[in-house]
Image (cartoon, rainbow, N blue to C red):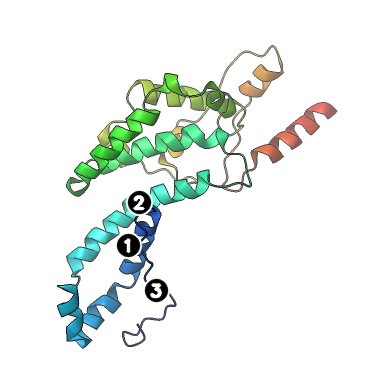
C-alpha cells in the first residue's frame, strides 16, 4: 500500500462463514484498498497467476453496490445488539425500514434473486402485523417521538403492503437518522387530535418530540413526569 501512495492503516478483513457481517467488512475494506489491488497486479506477475485474474473496475463497482445494500443491515444489527439503552420502542420502526430497503433494491437486476430470498424470510417473521407482540405497539405509544400517529402510519403500510417499489426508491428525507421509513413518517407531520380526558390521552394529544440520534426515551420520561408533578 505504501508503494501505491496510499496513506492508510487499513487492512483486508478476514471472512468468517458463520458471520455475514464479516463478509460485509471484507467487501468494504477491499473497495477502500482497490488501488492496492490494481498496483499489486502490475508489480507482481505471480499475483495474477495465483489469483486467477486481477480484480477489475467492474468488480469494484459490484462491490460498491453490495456494500451499499448491506450497510443498512449492519447498522441495524449493531442497533438491536446494544445493551445500554431501551430498544423495544424502535422495533417496528426498524422492521418496516427493512421492508422499504428490500423494496428499493428489488428493482436492481443484480439483486433480484438475493432480495427475493430475503423477502421470503421477512414475510415469514415480520410480514403479519397481527402476529407481532402487542407490547411492541404499546412501546411505540410511550415513545414521545412517535406515539399514535406513527402506529397509524405503520398500520397503513403493513396492511396496505408497504410502499410501492417506485415510492420506496424515491424516499429521500433529511432527518437525523438513517431509517427511511421513520423519515417517511416525519415527512407526514406526525400530528394527533385525540380528545383529552385523562393523562394518557393528554400525553397522546401533545405533538411528538423532535427526534435526534442521542435521544433518550428514559431521560425524556424522567423530565416529563418531574414537570407534570410540579404543575
Question: Which residue is at 53% across, 46% downward?
Answer: 81
The reply, left or right, for residue 103 in relation to residue 176 is left
For marks 1 and 2, the one nearer the N-term is 1
Q: Which residue is mark 2?
A: 70
Q: Measure the alpha-carbon separation of dots 2 and 3.
A: 20 Å
When the figure is inspected, residue 209 is found, relative to residue 130, above or below; the finding is: below
Q: Which mark is residue 27?
A: 1
Residue 231 in sight from this viewpoint: no
Q: Measure the alpha-carbon separation of dots 1 and 2.
A: 10 Å
Residue 14 location in percent, x, y? 37, 66
Tell which tag, 2 or 3, sits nearer the viewer: 3
The reply, left or right, for residue 198 in relation to residue 22 is right
The answer to whether marks 1 and 2 mark residues whose Cβ atoms lie closer than 8 Å is yes
Near mark 1 (Cα within 10 A), the count class, few <14, some 14-19 or many ≥20, is many
Q: Of all residues shown, which one is farthest toward the front?
A: 18
Say which element carries label 3.
loop
Question: Which residue is at 46% across, 46% downward?
Answer: 76
Residue 137 location in percent, x, y? 53, 24
Q: Which residue is mark 3?
A: 11
Amino acid at each position: 500500500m505504501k508503494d501505491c501512495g496510499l496513506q492508510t492503516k487499513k487492512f483486508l478483513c478476514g471472512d468468517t462463514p458463520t458471520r455475514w457481517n464479516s463478509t460485509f467488512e471484507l467487501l468494504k475494506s477491499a473497495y477502500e484498498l482497490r488501488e492496492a489491488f490494481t498496483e499489486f497486479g502490475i508489480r507482481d506477475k505471480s499475483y495474477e497467476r495465483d489469483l486467477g485474474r486481477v480484480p477489475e473496475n467492474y468488480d469494484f463497482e459490484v462491490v460498491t453496490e453490495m456494500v451499499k445494500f448491506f450497510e443498512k443491515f449492519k447498522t441495524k444489527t449493531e442497533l438491536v445488539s446494544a445493551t445500554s439503552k431501551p430498544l423495544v420502542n424502535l422495533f417496528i420502526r426498524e422492521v418496516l425500514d427493512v421492508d422499504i430497503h428490500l423494496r428499493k433494491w428489488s428493482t436492481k437486476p443484480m439483486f433480484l434473486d438475493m432480495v427475493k430470498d430475503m423477502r421470503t424470510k421477512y414475510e415469514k417473521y415480520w410480514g403479519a402485523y397481527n402476529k407481532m407482540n402487542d407490547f411492541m405497539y404499546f412501546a411505540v405509544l410511550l415513545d414521545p417521538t412517535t406515539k399514535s400517529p406513527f402506529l397509524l402510519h405503520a398500520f397503513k403500510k403493513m396492511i396496505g403492503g408497504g410502499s410501492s417499489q417506485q415510492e420506496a426508491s424515491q424516499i429521500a428525507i433529511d432527518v437525523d437518522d438513517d431509517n427511511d421509513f421513520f423519515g417517511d413518517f416525519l415527512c407526514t407531520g406526525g400530528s394527533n387530535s385525540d380528545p383529552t380526558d385523562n393523562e394518557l390521552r393528554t400525553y397522546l394529544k401533545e405533538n411528538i418530540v423532535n427526534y435526534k440520534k442521542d435521544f433518550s426515551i428514559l431521560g425524556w420520561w424522567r423530565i416529563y413526569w418531574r414537570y407534570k408533578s410540579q404543575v
